[in-house]
Image: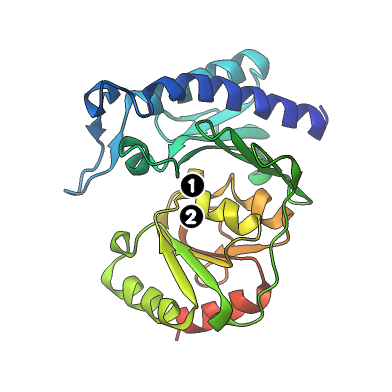
Amino acid sequence: MTAIDFAAFVDELATVSGETIRPFFRSALGVESLGLENKSRSGGFDPVTAADRAAESAMRALIKRTFPEHGVVGEEFGADNADAEYVWVLDPIDGTKSFICGMPVWGTLIALTRRGEPIYGMMHQPFTREHFSGDGRGARYRGPAGDRDLRVRACAALGDAILATTSPLLMNTADRQSFGRVENAVRLSRYGGDCYAYCVLAAGHVDLVIETELKPHDVLPLIPIIEGAGGIITTWDNGRPHDGGRIVAAGDRRVHAQAMEVLNG
């Protein structure tokens, strides 16, 4: 099967998940209609909704029907045939906290991996009807602003950079202090982006995203988008980001290097 066919199928997955999620978002019935539960076992708040589960179930069913030999790893229902050559990695709603607050900075993350390497990724925002996709060689945007190639912007100095993160409060004390050193060095920082922050980096609107405690399903779909747009994404110790953890994404390698130096200083 060609990459074009895979891209068309990812569009199908995005359509199916979006149609499932949209009726839940900003429902007139309020939060009570979301079937909200807390998955955290450590006393924090890690929400999951009926929309998360319904969207992942719909995507899994379509994958199973179309590619029965493929594996699936999803945030809500775990792994099925995870040792297959091709494995789909799904996060039905990345940014569930924003979702339940009615804020549109969340999205559905879909990755196709081959032998553990992400070869295609998409972030779909069904409320704003935006697609950000990439295959590591190129990246595309499709949405109300038109269709175009995604390209990161040049930024040579950390002092000129715009930094994004979901929230420093999600970091442990030591990591928050390291993040704070970078935040003090940049021109502007913004909070609350979840997966959307990485996509606006790929589109050339921000220069850095720094986060911690990510899971593979949080990052694998974004790697082909960021790299396809010309950016770089690594762990804080400059390793492969595939397993999640502490992540640094940048549009310009010069800013990435400077941010890494400050983080690890």
Could you tell me residue 46's position as x and y percent?
28, 43
Question: Is 94 left, or right, of 89 in this rendering?
Answer: left
Q: What element carries label 1?
A: helix
- For label 1, count other residues whose C-alpha is less than 10 Å away and answer few (under 14), some (14-19) or many (20+): many
Q: Is residue 66 visible to the viewer in this orientation of the structure?
A: yes
- The amino acid type found where label 1 is placed reads Asp
Colour scheme of the picture: rainbow
- For label 2, count other residues whose C-alpha is less than 10 Å away and answer few (under 14), some (14-19) or many (20+): some
Q: Which residue is drawn at 67% across and 16% down?
A: 66
Location of mark 1 (residue)? 218
Q: Residue at x 60, y 60 (%)?
A: 205
Which residue is farthest left? 43
The quadrant in which the C terminus is found is: bottom left
The quadrant in which the N terminus is found is: top right
Mark 2–mark 1 distance (CA, rounded to whole Å): 7 Å
User: Of residues 230 and 29, which is closer to you in this image?
Assistant: 29
Verify CB contact (< 8 Å) between mark 2 and mark 1.
yes
Work out whether 157 lies above or below 228. below
Work out whether 37 lies above or below 29. below
Question: Is 78 left, or right, of 130 in this rendering?
Answer: left
Could you tell me residue 90's position as x and y percent?
52, 34
Location of mark 2 (residue)? 244
Which residue is farthest bottom? 265
